[in-house]
Amino acid sequence: LCSPTTLYVATITVVLGLQAVFVPIQMLTNGGPNQGSTNLIFFVYQTAFQFFHTGRAAACAIMITLVFGILIALQSIFLEKKVHYEN
């Protein structure tokens, strides 16, 4: 009964954990000295809205989406083996 919920929570945690650090990076450090505290989401934001390289930012966003999709697919493949649905 608990394992489908665990799969859902694990998937959402991965996605939100990778994206939720955008606001603290932007507000506190703005990328930090020598881009030390930047991540992929903040890099896309900087590339698009600060440097105005929208094509490069769009390509990076598509690559990030593909990477997230692969991570979620791998996670669901490995965790789906442990999920038992009751009928």
Image (tube, rainbow, N blue to C red):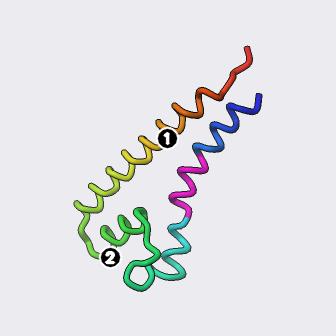
Q: Amino acid at mark 2?
A: Gln
**Horizontal side of residue 3 vs 34, given as left or right:** right
Mark 1 / mark 2, whichever is N-terminal:
2
**Horizontal side of residue 57 vs 76, given as left or right:** left
Query: What residue is at 46 percent from the left and 44 percent from the top?
Result: 71
**Horizontal side of residue 86 vs 24, given as left or right:** right
Q: Quadrant of residue 84?
A: top right
Q: Specify start and end residues of the magenta stretch as a single range.
A: 12-20
Q: Nearer the viewer, residue 18 or 48?
A: 18
Residue 26, position as x, y percentages in the image: 48, 76
In the displayed structure, 2 sits above or below 45; it is: above
Q: Which mark is residue 72?
A: 1
Q: Quadrant of the N terminus?
A: top right
In the displayed structure, 68 sits above or below 77; it is: below
Which residue position holds label 2? 50
**Horizontal side of residue 7 vs 22, given as left or right:** right
Question: Badge 2: how crowded within 10 Å, few (<14), some, or many (20+)?
Answer: few
Q: Residue furthest top?
A: 87
